[in-house]
Image (cartoon, rainbow, N blue to C red):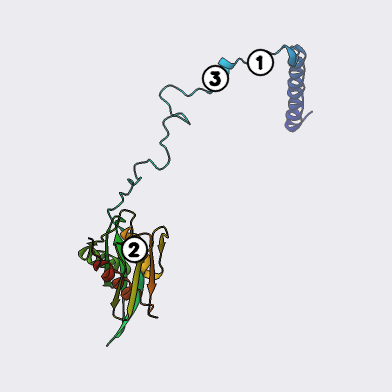
Amino acid sequence: MRTPRAREVSLFNTMTTEMEQEKIQEVVETPETVVVPAQEVEAPTAAAVVETHAPRAGGRSSLRGRAPRGGGRGARPPRERGEFEQVTIDARRVARVMAGGRRFNFSLVVVIGDKKGRVGVGLGKGVDTALAIDKAVRDAKKHLFTVPRTASGSIPHQVSMKYASSTVEIIPSEGRGLVAGSAMRTVLDLAGVTDVVTKIHTRSKNKLTIARATVGALKKLRTK
């Protein structure tokens, strides 16, 4: 007489045999897979490719609708060029001794001009360079003047001037261009003066005094 455990094992073997026979029967009845040669497969037409990759209606295209670089909402408008050009010819840091220590300020010399005869020299002092430049530009605008020039851009006659420790001389010379150095060249260039030869007769390297001596010499010019 078989035990309950032996009966369960016999029943399991019988079910397993029936499942294996059903799988074999399904494999036998499944039709064979048909392999089509690559030559008989038609290539997709261009219209089908375009239709496949075309963007959906109302969707975003990768090329259309893209904002140009630099023209977005945060782009800054082009800066308008001012009436005068400005050049900083000298910058110094000045220290002042106080009870709590040293206090530093900046001293800047700025030359402005429109290269059409108007020029000015200004001095500005401040706790930072931006404030000093702003003061120097305002001071230069207060001291603007017009330089008398000839038709070729030269000066009417020879002139010299002494200011503090600097002595300068400006000599007209047709066809030579602007022959100058140091701060004199900056002042004459922004004033639009050309065809002149300049000389600095002192050893002083102070650009502020040289620039003011040049301005004084230009103010002495007279036309007939």
Q: Position of residue 109 (x, y in %)?
A: 31, 70
Q: Which mark is residue 188?
A: 2
* Three-letter code, disc 1: Ala
Q: Which residue is mark 1?
A: 43
Q: Is residue 100 above or below residue 84?
A: below
Question: Left of 146 or right of it: where is 21?
Answer: right
| Separation (CA) of disc 2 from disc 3 | 67 Å
Q: Which of marks 3 and 1 precedes in the sequence?
A: 1
Visible in this render: residue 36? no
Picture residue at 56% right of the left edge, 15% below the top:
47
Q: Is residue 15 above or below residue 4?
A: above
| Position of residue 56 measured from the top left corner of the image (x, y, whole percent) | 46, 23
Residue depth check, mark 2 versus mark 3: number of the one nearer the observer: 2
CA gap between label 1 and label 3 equals 14 Å
Lower sequence index among marks 2 and 1: 1
Closer-to-camera residue (105/212): 212
Between discs 2 and 3, the one toward the N terminus: 3
As drawn, the residue found furthest toward the front would be: 224
Is the Cβ of the residue at disc 2 closer than 8 Å to that at disc 1?
no
- Dot 1, crowdedness within 10 Å: few (<14), some or many (≥20)? few
Q: Left or right of 15: which side holds 168?
A: left
Of helix, strand and loop, which one carries label 1? loop
Labels 2, 1: front one: 2
Circle 3 is placed at which residue position? 50
Q: Residue at x 35, y 72 (%)?
A: 91
Q: Is residue 44 above or below residue 222?
A: above
Q: Mark 3 packing: few (<14 Cα in 10 Å), some, or many (20+)? A: few
Residue 37 point in image, percent of width and height: 76, 14
Classify mark 2: residues with Cα within 10 Å, few (<14), some (14-19) or many (20+).
many
Amino acid on which disc 2 is placed: Leu
Q: Which residue occupies 22% across, 66% down?
A: 143
Q: Is residue 104 above or below residue 14?
A: below
